Image (spheres, coloured by chain):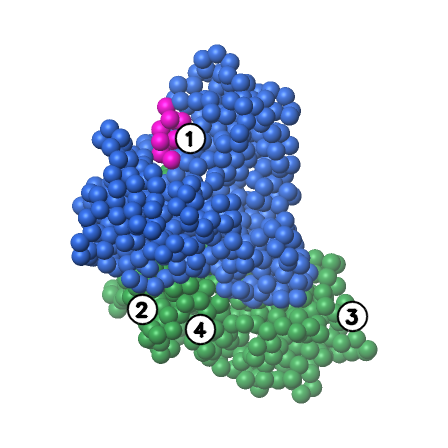
Chain colours: A blue, B green
Amino acid sequence: MGQARGGRRRLVVIGGDAAGMSAASQARRLDPDLEIVALEKGRWTSYSACGIPYLVGGDVDSIDDLIAREPQTFRTQHNIDARILHEATSIDVDAQKVEVRDHEHGGRNYTLGYDVLHIATGATPARPPLPGIDDPLIHGVQTLEDAADLLAHAKKLEDPCHVVVVGAGYIGLEMAEAFVKRDVRTTVITRTAEPLSMFDPDMGALIGEAMRKEDIDLRTRTAAQSFERRGDKRIDVHTNNGTLTADLVILGLGVGPNSRLAIDAGIAVGERDAVKVDRQQRTSSDGVYSAGDCCESFHRLTGQHVYVALGTVANKQGRTAGTNIGGGYATFPGVIGTAVTKLCALECARTGVNEKEAREAGFEFSTVTIDSTTRAGYFPGAAPIKVKMLGEKRSGRVLGAQILGQEGAAKRIDVVATAITAGLDVEELTALDLSYAPPFSPLWDPILIAARKLAESL
Amino acid sequence: MGQARGGRRRLVVIGGDAAGMSAASQARRLDPDLEIVALEKGRWTSYSACGIPYLVGGDVDSIDDLIAREPQTFRTQHNIDARILHEATSIDVDAQKVEVRDHEHGGRNYTLGYDVLHIATGATPARPPLPGIDDPLIHGVQTLEDAADLLAHAKKLEDPCHVVVVGAGYIGLEMAEAFVKRDVRTTVITRTAEPLSMFDPDMGALIGEAMRKEDIDLRTRTAAQSFERRGDKRIDVHTNNGTLTADLVILGLGVGPNSRLAIDAGIAVGERDAVKVDRQQRTSSDGVYSAGDCCESFHRLTGQHVYVALGTVANKQGRTAGTNIGGGYATFPGVIGTAVTKLCALECARTGVNEKEAREAGFEFSTVTIDSTTRAGYFPGAAPIKVKMLGEKRSGRVLGAQILGQEGAAKRIDVVATAITAGLDVEELTALDLSYAPPFSPLWDPILIAARKLAESL
């Protein structure tokens, strides 16, 4: 430990999850001689945070199922010195050193020199500065530590009980579903007019309907104002629309980048204080890379820098950084805003820009919404699917799509994501040779039906 | 009836299924003044032939479910004079006339003049000239008439009985599944080394395994040589590998274009005697269009003319023809060889070229095959999926893919179909922003995993 750089180049990775470990693994693959130290302040490396709602809901049996690779696997199979419970406390980019606190051994501090640094510190659930927000009955959902706490708490809930989810984004909805599956009374509050505001309000309204059908008490235009503990086990959530008493509160207000270390080191940040990176995932500081939930992304369609905290992006950015660190060449081509979630039987997917985003980015566009079925209408299991699609005026380019539907609906979004990435126009989309057989699709796939209608309106 | 052209332009459509009626409907939309007569020699217009195996298997209740639109709907809602049981018997392109036999009224013949003619005569299941091939116990599967006959026959089968399917293409497999669902002993014979020869043999072998697991008696390298009736209800199928006695035989040897009318009229035919068409679906004869199973397609990837008899292609070509007939402008951009089928639990999909097709078209390429899961590995219902992918040397272009897997696997082929259409290279494919959540996909979608591995091999 300490600064002991001889002939070997040393990479220090801060953060042992997707963006950190994918970079470390990729760098190792390209450069067998590189010394690699990965610092993770928590107990776990390389896990699926996206799986936490399914752990709480009982679809997934154990926290261990969410772990992709253990620290010892990195050590023994990849020659990566993965150190859990080691927290980077500061970075000195001029001296190329990281200060580390070793929580495993009584809080011992040490200094680690680096030739290349990779910052993959992730994100933290937003905790607005409301009175009572730090109450232990209020849980964020981000790390496996969060998951362990939350699961322990959820298991202790006694009937009858009440969970309040603050925020109706992806994680808010997924956690609401998880508690509904546990037969717990669940309320979701959101300050927006409709849930899942990454979807247009007309689609959001349908998501709201589906939530209410699943016995989720959805309260829109409702913002938490303060939290007040009531005895040992309960907490009041005061809102602009009255007070809810909860046994457990989930924060689903999105996440913010863990960029404090980088900012303190003088590394440039941009959108929402996320670390600024170029196409190779290089930060403003020489020899310092960053990837994942702590850094910015580039939106291919709008040309804007955006903050997107998704596992897919973290992995791709990490891999890009690792390739460059290992001596190869790779660029991260940006995001186009694809996301998917499931609320009980309802699948919700989006890609590209929605109407609000399109207007903000300065696009003129047409929009269509069509209804179809997931299979041939006469085939057993044919279920409703609704596709909304946006196309740019004049160029005819596909700008975005939103899909709501039952089993088999959502993954169709990938066709539109591919089309947007390739810059196809709507007319080209109508001509795609997509697969058809009665158990899989109507003869005209719903994507093609939407594209046809959109083409006529452009 | 007869030739009664006044001021109105008259379109005559020969064939009342997908390619014919989609052209008629589209022409009507663009030109409300056009007189449109559609001649269909059978009893039904606009039906889903692809649904026939599911009718036989019991997934679909009634033949009526397969009918998209009735003749009277065309007459009353679209002002299209749809005439069933009217058979075009010859075309005179110089005089712009069609001879018609009206089977509805005792075989009366009449002549119909046209300004524009659209030939959409479809295809007929191949019947190799083997002794006994015309026995009524041997059924093709193409029209609803075929379906009605077959269903009536299937319902009369008495236990124990035995169905022999000759040919292991899509329709052969789907019919085999249908009879297995009816608990009928089913044998499939094919002259090829593996079933579903549109897939590479390594994938075909796995399809064969799946068939045998479903208790389908699959006999490869086995060709029918003759058929010999045994009494009232049974027939011997003599093959190079012994004799099978069947209660019912299904022909699944592919289809050939119904181009005799066109050939006799001097209209040029090409690949497999299918009617030659340009990008607007115009034939070699002025004012004569053609679409669907009776005509050729253009393969976007190989640049070759190909014969593809699929409902999706028929509909798109019909629509293209109809747009041009109606005074608009449209081109059919060609096919890329996408197809999907389901054999009980196994989903099989392909797009682009397979290894044999790639070699024949003169491509140099690399191939990879990967195994993954349809959902996050830890998520309930995660099922195996295998993706084989081909990429061109030097250019890196994606050339094709084949997918085998359980529920949720096959429709992923559409991403590759879109990528091929857009001319994406494998590196670009690895960067696609595809949707991810644990119920829908592993973090790296199987398509991306395959693309990554392929990119490394190119």
Main structural element of the magenta stretch: helix, strand or loop?
Answer: helix
Neighbours of disc 2 within 10 Å: few (<14), some (14-19), many (20+) = some
Q: Share a chain, discs 1 and 4?
A: no
- Image spot of residue B165 (x, y percent): 37, 60
Task: Say which label, 2 or 3, has the lower sequence index.
Answer: 3
Q: Which residue is mark 1?
A: A57
Where residue A265 appears, as percent x and y from the top left, is 39, 46
Q: CA distance from mark 2 to mark 3?
A: 56 Å
Determine which quarter of the picture holds residue B403.
bottom left
Report the residue that reaches farthest toward the top. Answer: A231
Q: Amino acid at mark 3?
A: Asp
Q: Residues within 10 Å of mark 3 (few under 14, many from 20)?
A: some
Q: Is residue B117 magenta?
A: no
Numbered badge on residue A13? none
Q: Relative to the observer, which residue lies in front, A106 or B196?
A: A106
Between the C-alphas of marks 2 and 1, the distance is 43 Å
Q: Residue at x 31, y 57 (%)?
A: A325
Disc 2: host chain: B
Looking at marks 4 and 2 on the same chain, the residue that comes earlier in the sequence is marked by 4
Q: Position of residue A241 (x, y in %)?
A: 65, 24
The residue under label 3 is: B33
Give the residue type that dot 4 points to: Leu
Name the residue tied to disc 4.
B301
Kind of residue at badge 2: Leu
Q: Earlier in the sequence, mark 3 or mark 4?
A: 3
